[in-house]
Image: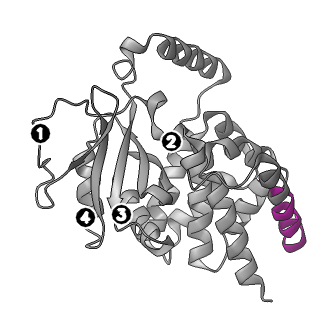
Amino acid sequence: MSRDPDALAVVTHLRDLAADPLNRRAIVQDQGCLPGLILFLDHPSPQVVYSALLALRYLAECRANREKMKSELGMMLSLQNVIQKTTTPVETKQLASEVHEILQMCVSEEEERGEEAAASVRRKTRFFVGNTNKRAKTVILHIDGLDDSNLRSLCEEALLKVRGVISFTFQMAVKRCIVRIRSDLTAETLANAIATTKVLRAQQVVKAEDGSEVLIPFDSEDGVPVDQKVSLPDYLPEDESPSVEADRAVSHVGTSEDRAGWLNTATNFLSRSFYW
């Protein structure tokens, strides 16, 4: 078997594992996976490079990972090389720039503890949820047509072009995408970006007062919701997001033992394939 298919298989699986927040710290703490992803940034296959960047973007979403990722040998330099290389596709450059920016913004340990304490207070004081988080919010989208990995890649490309998207996770079984965005970005903007694919159409998932979920469609031309008569919140609070329902998330791959076993397999592959 040639080396390229093996490399693509490994980096794709690492990307899928990194999409699950439960795996992110374990992947970064592993001695082989993070250095391997960095080396994949210099791989001749554009698809391998793009998948490695997606994995790094997911890993950087975990605040506890950022300092280690930023200080990992070759990380920032490899990202800069991807950004500056003239042959790099535009979408790949944008993704590399976003990872680079996230890692540059990593906070000190003291600031991190302060933010965690504040987050704990917000969770206990539920009345203020959604008002205290001024930097980011979570939007749940139901995407009609999200049927396979090719269409998921198409949706990824559309979302990555939207400035202000922080991260996203797919739940393929229920055709949903959980997107974290800047507070000044709107769900309409995300829906319009997805509509540019010509084959996918997004609706926002919100909760009614009785706790049931409601799909709010958008006008494909101007992004305005078709029905605004229902009194509903604009966004779901993050600790009420369906993303925490691990049994429904496609990105949740196997049990913790399965994930640990696969990480060992990936590490062995990387150790055989590279020298450091």
Mark-to-mark CA distance, 2 and 4: 23 Å
Determine the secondary structure under disc 2. Answer: helix
Residue bearing mark 3: 158
Residue bearing mark 4: 195
Mark-to-mark CA distance, 2 and 1: 25 Å
Residue bearing mark 1: 228
Horizontal side of 112 relative to 175 (left or right) equals right
Whether label 2 touches label 1, CB < 8 Å: no
Image spot of residue 147 (x, y percent)? 43, 70
Q: Which mark is residue 177?
A: none
> Which of the two residues, 217 or 85, is positioned nearer the viewer here?
217
Q: Amino acid at mark 4?
A: Ala
Q: Amino acid at mark 2?
A: Ser
The numbered mark, 1 or 4, whose residue comes first in the sequence reads 4
Determine the secondary structure under disc 3. Answer: helix
Determine the secondary structure under disc 4. Answer: helix
Horizontal side of 180 relative to 210 (left or right) equals right
The numbered mark, 2 or 3, whose residue comes first in the sequence reads 3
Kindly report which numbered mark, 3 or 4, lies closer to the viewer in this rendering. 4
Quarter of the image with the N terminus is bottom right
Q: Write the residue at 85% across / 51% down.
A: 31
Image spot of residue 196 (x, y percent)? 25, 67
Q: Quadrant of residue 21?
A: top right
> Which of the two residues, 240 or 214, is positioned nearer the viewer here?
214
Mark-to-mark CA distance, 3 and 4: 9 Å
Image spot of residue 99 (x, y percent)? 54, 51
Q: Which residues are magenta?
A: 263-276
Mark-to-mark CA distance, 2 and 3: 21 Å
